[in-house]
Amino acid sequence: MNIGYIRVSDKSQNPDRQIEKMKAIGIEERFIFVDRQSGKDFSRPAYQSMKRVLRAGDLLYLDALDRLGRDYDGIIDEWKDMTRNIGADIVVLEQESLFDSRKFREMGELGKLMEDQFLSLLSYVAAQERKKIRTRQREGIDLARRKGVRFGRPRVETTKDFRETIERWRNGEVTAREAMRICRMSPSTFYRRVEEWKEELR
């Protein structure tokens, strides 16, 4: 059976190009597994579902090696688990001339040695690319912060009668739930702002 595995890094990215590629080589849509998640590890729902379906003699297609993952040791371990323990084969479409495990299998022990060398090289490249991406993201965030951009949820401003409501709550005139309703705040925001208000009074 032919199976396709697809991964994009987050929900904002579109997997359609990879899906169409898999369909073009004759893989049925029900056997195309798609994750919208980082490649830092292999605890991805679609990936784990794919491995549960994968059997000896199956052929797994990847668009590129980094779609499998971006963890150096993990890529090598998962590749070997699927090809040597499960007995399936893997084809990486972007490097098909290099990465078609059927070719290595035909070469016996020499093929295993060559496969290990190629995997080590390209897994290292995939892992380094992930490090570069994280560095670029960190640099971008730092630059944005220096320019005054704030990240996270926008701060909920206190209402005019916030302090009056807090005083009533502290005096037992209203319940905490009623005070939150008046101030239009969630419990976490309400108690955080109460603590901030206390700090202002010191």
Image (spheres, helix red, strand yellow):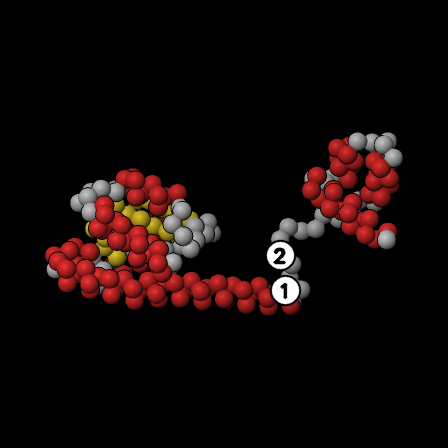
Q: What residue appears at the point 30 percent right and 57 percent down from the top-left corner? A: 76
Q: CA distance from mark 2 to mark 1?
A: 8 Å
Whether pointer 2 and pointer 1 mark residues with C-beta atoms closer than 8 Å, the reply is yes
Q: What residue appears at the point 43 percent right and 50 percent down from the top-left corner? A: 37
Q: Which mark is residue 151?
A: 2
Question: Does dot 2 land on a helix, a strand or a loop?
Answer: loop
Q: Residues within 10 Å of mark 2 (few under 14, many from 20)?
A: few
Q: Which callout, 2 or 1, points at the residue further toward the start of the chain?
A: 1
Amino acid type of the residue tagged 2 in the rendering: Phe
17 on left or right of 102: right
142 on left or right of 131: right
Q: Is residue 189 above or below residue 114?
A: above
Tell me where residue 131 appears, x and y as whole percent: 44, 65
Q: Is residue 2 visible?
A: no
In which image quadrant can residue 170 be found? top right
Given residues 121 and 156, the one toward you in this image is 121
Q: What residue appears at the point 75 percent right and 35 percent down from the top-left corner? A: 181
Q: Which mark is residue 107?
A: none
Q: Is residue 168 above or below residue 36?
A: above
Badge count: 2
Q: What residue appears at the point 25 percent right and 65 percent down from the top-left corner? A: 118
Given residues 26 and 108, the one toward you in this image is 108
Q: Quadrant of the N terminus?
A: top left
Q: Is residue 55 visible?
A: yes
Tell me where residue 38 appears, x and y as whole percent: 43, 53
Question: Does dot 1 land on a helix, a strand or a loop?
Answer: helix
In which image quadrant can residue 113 be found? bottom left
Tell me where residue 155 appears, x and y as whole percent: 70, 51
Q: Residues within 10 Å of mark 1 (few under 14, many from 20)?
A: few
| Residue beneath disc 1 | 145
Given residues 49 and 162, the one toward you in this image is 49
Amino acid type of the residue tagged 1 in the rendering: Arg
